Every structure is written in structure tokens, then in C-alpha cells.
Image (cartoon, rainbow, N blue to C red):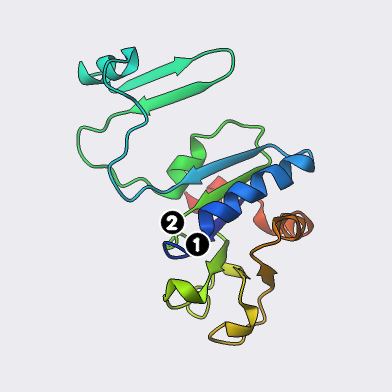
Amino acid sequence: MKVVGFAGYSGSGKTQLVERLIPELKLRGLRVSVVKHAHHKFDIDHPGKDTYRHREAGAFEVVVASDRRLALLREFEQPAKLSVHHLISELWEGVDWVLVEGFKESNLLKIEVWRPEAGKQARYPDDDFIVAIATDAADQLPQATLRPVLDLNDPDAVAGWLVENGDRFDYDPERYA
């Protein structure tokens, strides 16, 4: 399995890039999973549904599945600090690429998504885990870099770069244990 992070501030275009990369990688015959960091309390379940009722009754985990989909809902009694590596370990074997959105402080190799309009400082000058920058304003990068600069608006080219450099992104869970 290969794992790459996409780091950037809110409004930089991370979600849009990841969303557009998934079909590009699938066109290359690759199975893709996504790990997404959520900053706020979120819920994918709804009041009145059986799974919601089971959680409300106190179940630690609820798995709901059909022949097309599986969802695992886990309730923590206390706030849990899960690392990106915990979440990657939850994924099904047989995945070719894991695209990680968020977790900008992680020790994963990452592509920084940067737009000057976001008004935020670029992270690549100070983050050794950033291996490339995806931007729509290469001429406005705040500091020169030897890292590859990818066109944020060309997901085919970004996918091609990932595949060409795939060996760099091999994930070894022992490395992060």
C-alpha cells in the first residue's frame, strides 16, 4: 500500500484535489482509500435509524453492512487522540493508494496544497515531510524550492507524478510503530 498526505490550510483546495485524484488513479486500475481528518464533532448516522439507536443505547461499536457497503461506527467514552497511523491500520488490505487529507502535522510524506488567496503561509519551507507542492500559482510561491511543483488544476498530471514516484510512498507500519 502507498500512502500520501495532502496538507494545506482550509480553503486551499485539498478536498477538491483529492476528489479529482480518485478517478484518475482508478482509471489506472488502482484501488483508492481516503483517510480524512475532521476538526469538529461530526456524525454520519441519523436519529431514528437502527444504528443510531444502538449507539444511543450504549454500544461501543456498530457495524452495518450490505452487499455494497460497510460502515463501522465507534463511540469513545473519553476523547481519543487517534494518529493517522491508527486510522490507516483500520483500512482493508488490498488498497493500492491511501490519500490522507489533513493531518498536516503528521510524519507522512505529503503534498502541500497551496493557494495565495488562502492568505496562509506556506508550510514547505519548514516541513521536511512535504515532498511536492500543488498550486495554481507557481510563480507566487513565497520561497524557491527544489521540490516538484505540480499544477493543482491538473489532477491527471498529479496522479501521474504519484504513480511515477510510487516507490517513495510505500507504507511500512513498522516504521511508525
Q: List x then y, in percent, for residue 48.
A: 27, 15
Above or below 71: residue 100? below
Question: How dense is the environment of label 1, judged by Cα within 10 Å: few (below 14), some, or many (20 and up)?
Answer: many
In the image, what residue occupies the spot 43% across and 56% down? 103
Q: Given the image, on which type of amino acid does mark 2 rest?
A: Phe
Q: Given the image, on which type of amino acid does mark 1 rest?
A: Ala
- The residue carrying mark 2 is 103
In the displayed structure image, the side of residue 144 where residue 70 appears, left or right? left
Pointer 1 and pointer 2: residues touching (CB < 8 Å)? yes
In the displayed structure image, the side of residue 127 where residue 137 appears, left or right? right
Instruction: For mark 2, give the secondary structure.
Output: loop
In the image, what residue occupies the spot 43% across and 16% down? 64
Question: Which badge, 1 or 2, comes first in the chain's sequence?
Answer: 1
- Compare residues 21 and 95 and report the one nearer the observer: 21
Instruction: For mark 1, give the secondary structure.
Output: strand
In the image, what residue occupies the spot 78% across and 41% down? 27
Above or below 36: residue 145? below
Q: List x then y, in percent, for residue 170.
A: 66, 51
Q: Residue furthest front?
A: 117
- The residue carrying mark 1 is 7
Above or below 135: residue 10? above
In the image, what residue occupies the spot 26% across and 33% down? 76
